[in-house]
Structure formats: C-alpha cells, structure tokens
Image (cartoon, rainbow, N blue to C red):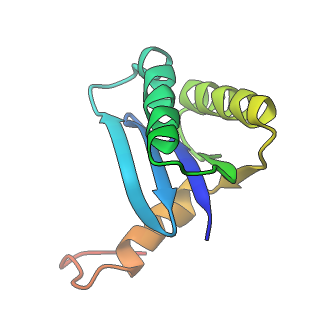
Amino acid sequence: MAAIINIETSTDVCSVALTYNGLVVMQRDDESGHNHATMLSGFIKDALDQAKFNDIKLEAIAVSIGPGSYTGLRIGLSEAKGLAYALDLPLIGVSTLQLLTADVMFREFYDENAVV
C-alpha cells in the first residue's frame, strides 16, 4: 500500500494529511479562511516529521487540482510540486469535485437532501 501526503487548498479550508495503507496517520486543518500561504508549509513539515517518526517511506504527493479558489490552488500546487520534486516522488492531481462526491457516496447514512 501507499504512503501519501495529501494537500487540499481549493476551498477556505487548508488541509494536509498523511495516509498510510488507506488510513489517516495525521491530519492538520485550518478553517479560519484564506491563510493557506501561512499555514501550509507548517502542516507539510508536520506530515514529514510524522512520516519520519513512524518510519514511513513516502510514495507520492497528492494535491487537489480544483475547481476552487484560484489563489488557494496556486499555493497548494506550488508547494506540492516543489515537495514532489525535492523528494523525487510522483505528484498526483485529484479533482476537488470527485473528492466531495466520494465523501457523500461512502457515507453509511445520507443527509436528507444529499445531492451528487
């Protein structure tokens, strides 16, 4: 299975997660608004530290590619591309709409007005 750093900056929420074998090892979120440029590097450092602490060999970097906030996407994609280049890892682009759809589709119970 894969160990992946996941970066999401297409919305007001800035989020980084480290996943391993399909499980979330760590996650950092900032929901205070458009602080992506301030928060993202620290969140990525936390994920890298957690991977090192748990002796997890990273296999890829995943990043949201939109649609979403133009500036947020530029920040996330720039950091993800730089990280992937520095660590010689593949960069995986993930559609924000597909992520939102998957969240609804994998729920055990649906909200009354859930629309996909």
Q: With respect to residue 44, does 52 lie above or below?
A: below
| Residue 9 visible in the snapshot | no
| Residue 57, position as x, y percentages in the image | 63, 51
The foreground one among 41 and 1 is 1
Q: Which residue is drawn at 65% across and 27% down?
A: 79
Residue 71 or 52: which is nearer the viewer? 52
Residue 59 located left or right of residue 31: right
Residue 73 percent coordinates (x, y): 60, 33
Residue 59 at x, y percent in the picture: 69, 54
Residue reaching furthest to the bottom: 108
Taking 11 as reference, is 39 above or below it?
above
Give the quadrant of residue 96: bottom right
| Residue at the spot 80% in from the left edge and 32% down from the top edge | 85
- Outermost residue toward the left? 112
Rendered view: 113 above or below 90: below
The percent position of residue 89, horizontal first and vertical second, equals: 77, 45
Side of 113 where 47 appears, left or right = right
Question: Can residue 83 be seen in this snapshot?
Answer: yes
Asked if residue 22 is positioned above or below residue 30 in the image, the reply reads below
Quarter of the image where the C terminus is located: bottom left
Taking the spot 40% from the left edge, 22% from the top edge, the residue there is: 34
In the image, what residue occupies the spot 61% across and 71% down?
Answer: 1
Q: How many labels does the image show?
A: 0
Seen from this angle, which residue lies furthest top? 38
Give the image quarter of residue 31.
top left
